[in-house]
């Protein structure tokens, strides 16, 4: 299996929001841990918090996480002030479909953003969403085994379909 994200970027803040809007994207589905915030932290980094406020002015934001801890996810929902879906079982599409329906979102107007090709990008592709693969936030602080597993997982990724024309 080869996964081909629409875009590959280093960090969520590198997304070109104007280009996404011009392409008809009005909703963004984010993975949580290592995409928007460091794992198990429950807190956004300052630059991502400021950027996310701009994003929310222009896009509907939803978080889809495989994290099974509902108490932690409730804390995250309060921090982010947006719909948060725990225990999403990505790449299974059931929770993502539920999020689309409950938030009146059309798949063709949605992008899925995450750090894992075999969960985040695959669920997005299964739903025919624009997909954006980001580097994990804590990639320099992960154990050697996790780094090795990530390298193996990235072998499933081919080059992005498109590049953002300029970063915002």
Image (spheres, grey):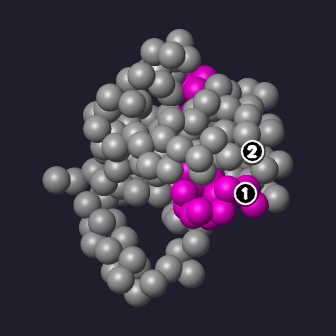
**Residue 25 drawn in magenta:** yes
**Residue 111 drawn in magenta:** no
Magenta residues, as a range? 21-45
Going by the image, does 119 lie left or right of 132?
left
Rendered residue at 32%/74% (across/down): 149
Circle 2 residue: 79
Q: Which mark is residue 4?
A: none
Q: Residues within 10 Å of mark 1 (few under 14, many from 20)?
A: some
What secondary structure is marked by label 2?
helix
Q: Is residue 42 visible?
A: yes
Rendered residue at 48%/41% (across/down): 86
Viewer-proximal residue among 3 and 80: 80
Q: Residues within 10 Å of mark 2 (few under 14, many from 20)?
A: few
Residue extending farthest to the left is 1
Circle 1 residue: 43
Horizontal and vertical percent position of residue 158: 30, 57
Viewer-proximal residue among 49 and 41: 41
């Amino acid at each position: 299996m080869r996964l081909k994200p629409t875009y590959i970027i280093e960090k969520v803040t590198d997304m070109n929001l104007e280009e996404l809007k011009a392409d008809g994207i009005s909703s963004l589905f984010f993975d949580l841990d290592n995409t928007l915030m460091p794992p198990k932290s429950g807190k956004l980094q300052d630059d991502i918090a400021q950027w996310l406020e701009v994003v929310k002015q222009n896009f509907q934001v939803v978080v889809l996480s495989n994290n099974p801890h509902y108490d932690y996810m409730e804390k995250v929902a309060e921090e982010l002030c947006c719909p948060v879906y725990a225990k999403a079982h990505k790449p299974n599409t059931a929770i993502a479909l539920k999020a689309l329906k409950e938030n009146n979102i059309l798949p063709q107007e949605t992008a899925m953003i995450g750090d894992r090709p075999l969960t985040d990008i695959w669920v997005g592709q299964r739903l025919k969403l624009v997909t954006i693969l980001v580097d994990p936030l804590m990639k320099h602080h992960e154990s050697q085994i996790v780094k090795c597993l990530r390298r193996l997982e990235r072998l499933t990724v081919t080059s992005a379909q498109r590049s953002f024309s300029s970063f915002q």
